[in-house]
Structures are given as structure tokens and as C-alpha cells.
Image (cartoon, helix red, strand yellow):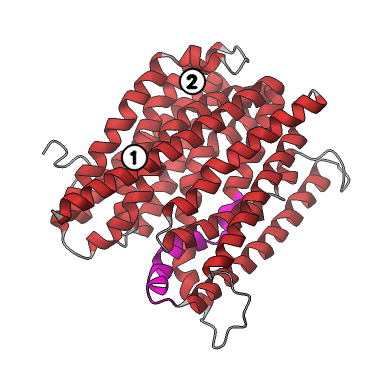
Amino acid sequence: MEKKKQSGYFQRTISVMVTIYVSSYLITYTINVILAQLLSPEDYGNYKIAENFFDLASIPVLMGGATAALKFLPIAFKESNLTLIWEYTRFYLITILTLSFLLALITFSISINFLDNTLFGNHHPIAYATAIVPIMAIIVLIRSILQSKGLIYTSFIPKAISYPILQLGFILALYAFVGKLTVSWALMIAFTSLLIILCYLLIKGKQLGIIRFKKIKNPTSPLIWLKVSITMMLLSILHSVLNQIDLYMIEIFGNEDAVGYFATAQVTVMLLFSIQSAFMIVFNPLITLLLKEDMHNARKLNAKCFRLLLAFILPIGGLLFLFSKPILSIFGHNEPEAATTLQILVPGYLFSAMFAIPYSWLKYSGQEKNVTIIMFACLTLNIILNGLLIPNYGIQGAAIATTAMFISTFIALCIMVKKHLGFYPWSRVGS
């Protein structure tokens, strides 16, 4: 009876998290449609480059503190050790602010010296996006700390739902009053929306005692945390770069309009990634516990996760593939290559969604270094293929490179899971 209650609870939690992430995706998708219609393909591409930049840059300035929080803080919450929790939070807050300042300094220096700009000149949107990096990183940190306390909904709803709603509201209001939108204004809207979310999370953290502003006696050596968090950071960076490298490669080997066209296809197919994220938020904590118990229950969890994941992503992937042209037509760019690009990306992102399961098993079973090697090798493959294919095949070549990379990553991770844990992600799925 207890196992049935737990199974029902987890399935309900998954359903709620999938609903949250799909809702977030739909709002974000609406935002991208509006931006694509109000901005030129070149400007929309520049905005997506900047957006991907502050998403990616928030990982190294955080130094893996968010991911490592799930390893260090649950026990501290269980023991009500709020001093240790604040000590951990304070260290990574200082790390974020310091590294974000250095990042901004380097970015503007490069822009001034190589793009012939003044300090307040017409910089690439990436330079202005550096202001968003520390806000995004602090949000991710506090979100993980709240997750460590077991507050899954409290930790993810503000960023997943409130942020895109605020962003959408500001965009519509600005356009209603001014009648136009620029890349700079779009970034300012993202900055303001995230700042509001950050203020809410800081207040919530203060109420829960996570943020205390008290002097700490006998502080813990940060090396204890950094030894784990830096490894986690490298994995997070590689995982994020796998999903973003194409836009940068098209920027280098293609043209500005092509970035915008590819971004519309990528934004659409990211629905599969949103569903994957919702699943892994629920299952990742269970993986850690079961690896310490027995592999029989671990295999059962694996089968359940893979079966449920396929039930969600396969029908949606099929719809995206069959109706790629009408789906992308709402962006208003009318680029026929984008529809074919989306069709090529769909199988790649299906494998991307599925490789999250072997990726998590390996990451939490002490195989972080091997996973890093695999991710780096597949990223290298993607870069080489992009360099070969984009000049001749444009955005479709980039899509082929991405799909080949995700399929290769999935195969390599599955082989490693079988070698170290004795099962494949699809083992016992039909039982």
C-alpha cells in the first residue's frame, strides 16, 4: 500500500511538473513568435544569441554551486543547520558577483578593442546581456537551495511561469505605447522581469532563514564544495553548449538572417527538452537514493521513467515533424528551409530527451569524468560537422550536425550505463 501511495505521488508530481514546464514553454513560445514578428530575422537572431549567452554564462559564474547544492544541503536542512546553509549561499553569491564583474569587463573590452566601439557605443547585444548574467545565476542558486529543502513547486514556478508572463506583459505594454521593439528593449525587458523574480526569491529565502546576514564563526573551507561543484559545472556547461552551439556556428559560418531562421526551429523543438527537464527534476533525487540501496529498485525506477518519458515525447515529436510548416508559419519569416530544419531536429531532440536518463544515472554514480569525456567528444563532433555542413547546406546542415551529435551521445551513454550499472535505459520497459 505504501509503495502504491509513493508511486501515485511521484506520477502526480511528474504530471504537475510537466504541466508547469509545458505551460512555461507555450508562454515562451508565444514571446518568441511576437519577437520574431516585431524584429527582423537579423535582430531576432541577435536577441537569441544574447539570450543563449546569459543562460550559458550563468553556469561558469555560479561555479556549479546550484547543482552541488543538491548534494550538500538536503542533510543540512534535515538537521536544521541554517548556519551552514547561509554559509554555502553566501560563498556562491560572492562568487557569482565577482566572476560576473570580470565577465562584463572582458566582454566590453573585447567589444571595444575588436569592434571599434566606445564604452557606450553600439555594442553587440551579448555585451549588454552580461548585466543579466548575475541575476540569472543567483536565481538558479536560490532555486536549487529551495529544491534541496523539498520545495519543488516554490523553487521552479517563479522562474518557469512568472518570468515568461512578466516578459510577455512588458513586451505587449511597450509595443502598445511605443509601437515598435528593438533588441536592446527586449533585453531590458528580460533584465527587469528576472530582477522581479530575484527580489521575490530573496524575500522568500529570508523568510525561510536561508539568507540570514549573520556573521559566521569557524567557516567551512570552500574547497570542500568546489571539488564537487566545479566538476558539476563542467558537465552543466557541456550539456548547455550541446543545445546552443549551432547558433554560434551559424553566426560564424552562415549569415545573420540564418541565425533567426534556425532559432525559430530550435525554439519549437525545445518543447521536447522542457518535458525532459520536468521528468528529471522529479527523478534525479530518487536516483541518488536508490544507488545506495539496491539495483533491483533502481532498474524499476529506470523502466518507469523511460516508459513515461516516451509516452510524452513520441506523440509530441510526431506532431512537430508532421506539421512543421504550419507551426513555423506563425513566426512570420516565411523561410521554407526552417520547416525542413525542424523536421531534421525532431529526431535529434527525441534522442536528447532520452539521453537525460543514462546521463543522470552516470552523473550520480561517480562516473562524472567519463560522462564529461563523452559530452566533450560529441561536442567536438558537432563542431566539426557544423564547420563542414553549414557552408554548403546552411541551417539544414546545422540541424544534421545536431541530430548526429545527440544520437551519438545517447548511444555512448547507454553503452556506459550497461557497462557500469548492468542495464540499458529501455531495460524492462515492457514489463
Dot 1 surroundings within 10 Å: few (below 14), some, or many (20 or more)? Answer: some
Instruction: Residue 39: give x, y in percent of width and height.
Output: 71, 24
Residue 214, located in which quarter of the rendered image? bottom right
Q: Nearer the viewer, residue 420 or 19?
A: 19
Q: Is residue 205 left or right of residue 281?
A: right
Amino acid carrying mark 2 in the image = Thr
Q: Is residue 429 left or right of residue 231?
A: left
Q: Residue furthest bottom?
A: 218
User: What residue is rendered at 48% in x and 72% in y?
Assistant: 225
What segment is highlighted magenta in the picture?
Answer: 57-80
Q: Is residue 393 left or right of residue 332?
A: left
Q: Is residue 272 magenta?
A: no
Q: Is residue 65 magenta?
A: yes
Label 2–label 1 contact, CB within 8 A? no
Callout 1: helix, strand or loop? Answer: helix
Instruction: Residue 26: give x, y in percent of width and height.
Output: 50, 30
| Location of mark 1 (residue) | 15
| Location of mark 2 (residue) | 341
Comes first in the chain, label 2 or label 1 = 1
Q: Is residue 58 among what the camera can see?
A: yes
Amino acid carrying mark 1 in the image = Ser
